[in-house]
Amino acid sequence: MTLRRWLHQHPLFTLWLPLVAWMGLIFCLSAQPDFPHPEVDWLEGLIGIGAHMFLFGVLAVLWARSLQGQRRTLLLAFLLTMLYALLDEFHQSFVPGRTADPLDLVYDGLGAALALGAWAWLQHRRASN
């Protein structure tokens, strides 16, 4: 049996482990009291927004991959991503030097929506070819 075939038969490793690992990465990043940042305020803000959109966009796609075949996969992936984003902000409120910012939830949701839209478009293209 090839490794590829074995992995296909064990979705825990190919679908759920990357999802849980990414959630762990987000948790670890949220537990950091401070990150190195540029001296320019607008650049720091832009990097922070981009980081939120990227991290939660990837999380949303990993949810969609893991839930594929479920009814309303994209909606469920988006809702689960936003639930984790809410928990992430709650977690940050307990980390010294960090605060919970409701605006971060907007960036998380925007990143998740854009990533899920791109993922759905790619899935549709792949299916039509």
Image: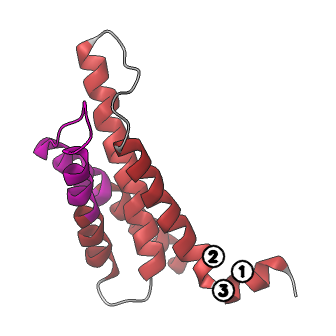
Q: Secondary structure at mark 3?
A: loop
For the record, the magenta segment spans 84-113
- Identified at 38% across, 37% down, the residue is 32
The furthest residue to the top? 39
Is disc 1 placed on a helix, strand or loop? helix
On the picture, is 64 further left or further right than 97?
right
At label 2, counting other C-alpha atoms closer than 10 Å, the crowd grade (few under 14, some 14-19, many 20 or more) is few
Observer-nearest of 11 and 125? 11
- Disc 1 residue crowd, few under 14, some 14–19, many 20+, Cα 10 Å: few
Name the residue that disc number 1 marks. 7
Q: Residue at x 40, y 60 (%)?
A: 59
- In the image, 31 versus 43, the foreground residue is 31
Residue 83 percent coordinates (x, y): 23, 66
Residue 20 on image: x %, y %: 48, 66
Q: Is residue 63 left or right of residue 94?
A: right
Cβ atoms at labels 2 and 3 below 8 Å apart: yes
Q: Which residue is mark 2?
A: 13
Asked if residue 70 lies left or right of residue 8, the reply is left
Per the image, label 2 sits on a secondary structure element best described as helix
Image height of 55 relative to 117, above or below: above
- Count the marks: 3
Tell me which amino acid carries mark 2: Phe
Residue tagged by mark 3? 10
At x 29% / y 10%, what residue is drawn?
40
Where, by quadrant of the figure, is residue 129 drawn? bottom right
Predominant secondary structure in magenta? Answer: helix
Residue pictured at 28% horizontal, 62% vertical:
84
The relative height of residue 81 versus residue 129 in the rendered view (above or below) is above
The amino acid pointed to by label 3 is His
Q: Residues within 10 Å of mark 3 (few under 14, many from 20)?
A: few
Q: In 3D space, how far apart are the residues under numbered discs 2 and 3 (Cα atoms)?
A: 6 Å
- Image spot of residue 103 (x, y percent): 13, 42
